Every structure is written in structure tokens, then in C-alpha cells.
Image (tube, rainbow, N blue to C red):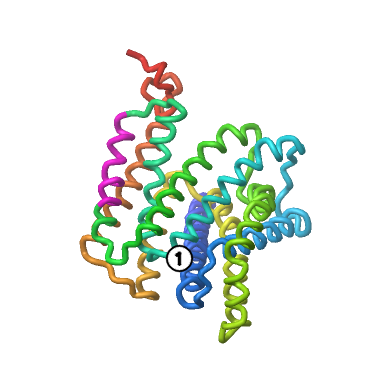
Amino acid sequence: MEESRLCQWSVIRSVLAIVQWWGFNVTVIIMNKWIFQKLDFKFPLSVSCIHFICSAIGAYLVIKVLKLKPLISVNPEDRWRRIFPMSFVFCINIVLGNVSLRYIPVSFMQTIKSFTPATTVFLQWLVWRKYFDSRIWASLIPIVGGILLTSITELSFNMFGFCAALFGCLATSTKTILAESLLHGYNFDSINTVYYMAPFATMILAVPALLLEGSGVMEWFHTCPSLFSSLIIIFGSGVLAFCLNFSIFYVIHSTTAVTFNVAGNLKVAVAVTCSWLIFRNPISSLNAIGCAITLVGCTFYGYVRHKLSQQSPGTPLTPRTPRGKVLQ
């Protein structure tokens, strides 16, 4: 009886974790698109900088003031040698995501972001010389095919936004790969990651945002018809962006790897549906099919990676086997 109750509570906890993660993620995406499209605040660098500032303050409050998470100590040399390069890639990743939202619909942007597994595998194979099982490469076929179909049939296609989203995938992959080497020895959670990276990201982005968008932001201040409510939405998106990092930490600790992968792909479907209901951007049937194929491919890729990770370390042809050491 007691085991049954514990099992039920575990399921309920996992569902609640996933729902709140979906809620924060979709809300942040929709709010950012609303800021660019409805508030006419067309300054992605400034929006990203506000997000970094809110995240830095939020992480400080959680760790230093509320003490909800213990601080993982990092020596000053490693902060510049390891954390700063990661922060630079992290900054580029967020900025490119917001730039793409500025020019293309949420549905298209989210579908392109699903290309990240393919770019991660390709970069590890090309640059880091890692061998991948043939099943990994096969699982990427529907992802690439779905992205191609979605891009060709996108009715609101914008080349600049498309390139920003695509390079954003590369930045995400680079960040993931670099984390394995640069953060080796530090068992960072999402809150400590934001605590160390957000201040560096703010420092990196503040000057470009001021130089490139400063005059435009000042002009927007003088012409915005409802300044106070608009600022609440803009800074509110920054607060929710930090809450999203907290929710990621919660969902990772409440679900299995397979559940997290499936929930992540379903999250994209939720974001696409919600954005269409709000912004009513045109979506053709072939475009929707392309998005669905991509999400199915991502789910299959995650399943294959999970199965291969359960093989014994001595099993040949695992995803992390260097190409030069493949058993003949």
C-alpha cells in the first residue's frame, strides 16, 4: 500500500514538473514574440541583456539570500578560463534565439531548434573526432528531412531569421559539447550555471546592445503609447526566463532521461500550437507534417541514445567511441 502511494506520488510529481516546465518555456517564447511583434520593441540584444540581468539577480537571490541551492565554489582562475568561454557561447545562443524570433514565427523557430541533435552529432564527429553508431545517423534522417520540408513550405520564411535560428542550433551544440570539457569536475545544476554565466553574458552583451540598439530603444521610449505596461511585460519575460532555468532543474530531478526527452519534444508541439492560437501565423498542411516528422525524429534519436548509453563500456560502436579506435 505504501509503495503504491509512493509510486502515485512519483508519477504526480513528474507530471507537475513537466507541466510547469512547459508553462514557463512556452510563456517565455510567446512573451518574447509578443514583445517583438505587438509591442514593436524590435531590439533582440536589449531583450537578451534584460534576461541576463534578471537571471543574474534571480540566481543570486536563490543561492545567497534564500539559500535554496548550495553554491558550487569555482576558483577565480577557472572562472575566466572555463566559465567565461562558456558564457560567451551561452550569450550567442540566447541572442540568436531572440533574433530569430524577431523575424520568423514561433512555430518555424521551434522546429529549427529541433535540428540541434543533428548539429551536435555532426560537430562531435567533424571536430572532436567521435565515432557514432549507424543507428544514431539513421535517427537523424527524419530530423533533417522534417526540417527541409518545414523550411521549403514555410509561408512566412525569412532568410535572416532562418540563419539566426540555424546558427543558434550550432551555438547550442557547441555549448553542450564544451560543457563536457570546460566544466569537467564541476557538478553544476542549472541554477549555479546561471549564477556564474549570467553576469559574464551581461558584461559581454551590454556594450553591443548599447551601441547597436541604444538610439532605437530611446526612440521607442518616447513613442510607446503604453510605456508602463510594456516595460512590465519586457521585464516580466526576464523574470520568467530565470524561472525557466529553475523549472529545468526541477524537471530533470523529477523525471527519467527518456521522459525528459519525450516531454521536451512534446513541449515544442505545445509551443507551436499556442503560438498559432495567439498569433495566427499561416501554417500549411505540409509545413505541419514537416514539423511532426522532425519531432518524431527527435524522439527516436533520444530513444536510440538512451539505448546505446545502457550498453556496457566495453561494447564496440558506442556513441562515444573515438573514430580512430573502432574495433575492426
Pinpoint residue 68: horizontal percent, then vertical percent: 71, 55
- Start and end of the magenta stretch? 134-148
Pinpoint residue 54: horizontal percent, then vertical percent: 66, 62
Which corner quadrant holds the C terminus?
top left
The amino acid beneath tag 1 is Arg
Taking the spot 53% from the left edge, 63% from the top edge, the residue there is: 44
Residue named by callout 1? 102
Which one is in front, 37 or 267? 37
Taking the spot 30% from the left edge, 30% from the top edge, the residue there is: 134
Which one is in front, 158 or 37? 158
Pinpoint residue 270: horizontal percent, then vertical percent: 39, 64
In the image, taking residue 311 as reference, residue 147 lies left or right, namely left
Q: Can residue 242 be seen by looking at this rendering?
A: no
Graded by Cα atoms within 10 Å as few (under 14), some (14 to 19) or many (20 or more), the crowding at tag 1 reads many
Mark 1 lies on a secondary structure that is helix
Query: In which image quadrant can residue 152 be found?
Result: bottom left
